[in-house]
Image (cartoon, helix red, strand yellow):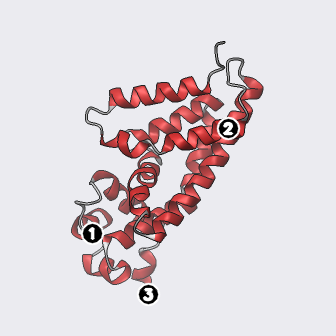
Amino acid sequence: MIANARLKDRDFMEAALICFSTHEFGKVTIHQISGFTSVPSSMLIAEYRNKTELFAAALNWYVDNGFDSMLRELRKTHCPVAAILSFFRAVSERSVNAGGSSARLIFTTAISLATRNLAFEQIVSDAIHKLETFFHECVTEGQETIDNMTQEPAEHVTKLLIGSVAALPALTRVDGGHAAVDQFIWSIHLLLQKGRG
């Protein structure tokens, strides 16, 4: 019973997510996950059956425990526009940073798995709901405090930003990453600026 409790704790889930962030989902093995988490493969299989179920459990844990704190930290440490841009940069780049690598897994790998697995559909839905709130709060605050912030209704801008999330799977597959990421971030920045008419 104590061993199984370990498979639900923060250290285990974070180690599993780092493993999934480090290796491409299709190529990662239970043996590699075992090495990252220091949990025997047999115990992982007994608890989760396969890597897909383990991935779903780890992402579900992250959405419930880490995603909100990542978004709160971005709001706390950045102005509204920078918070939005920092989110997109964190989930676009391959580096393993605080929360960004796990969030990237939601908006890239989990989205692709959602068409075949209802657990991932729910995980993505829960994360998108939290992200909508984050974007809406940032846009609303920015419109009140930043002169060159777009004055389009916050609901419309939020929908466009959520739509931009759909580009993330393609963006993460682009070779040479940084130029593509920089161009993508610049397009989000332009979206948030007041139109020049």
- Which of the two discs, 3 and 1, sits closer to the camera? 1
Q: Which residue is mark 1?
A: 34
Crowd tier of the residue under label 2, counting other residues whose Cα lies within 10 Å: few below 14, some 14–19, many 20 or above = few
Q: Helix, strand or loop at disc 2?
A: helix
Residue 15: image location, x then y, percent: 37, 60
Q: Which residue is mark 3?
A: 1
Crowd tier of the residue under label 1, counting other residues whose Cα lies within 10 Å: few below 14, some 14–19, many 20 or above = some
Label 3 and label 1: CA atoms lie apart by 19 Å
Q: Quadrant of residue 66?
A: bottom right
The kind of residue tagged 3 is Met
- Tell me the quadrant of the picture where the N terminus can be found: bottom left
The dot on residue 47 is none
Instruction: Tell me if I can see residue 174 in this picture.
Output: yes
Q: Helix, strand or loop at disc 1?
A: helix
Return the residue found at the far right.
144
The dot on residue 156 is 2
Q: Quadrant of residue 31?
A: bottom left
Sequence-earlier tag: 2 or 1: 1
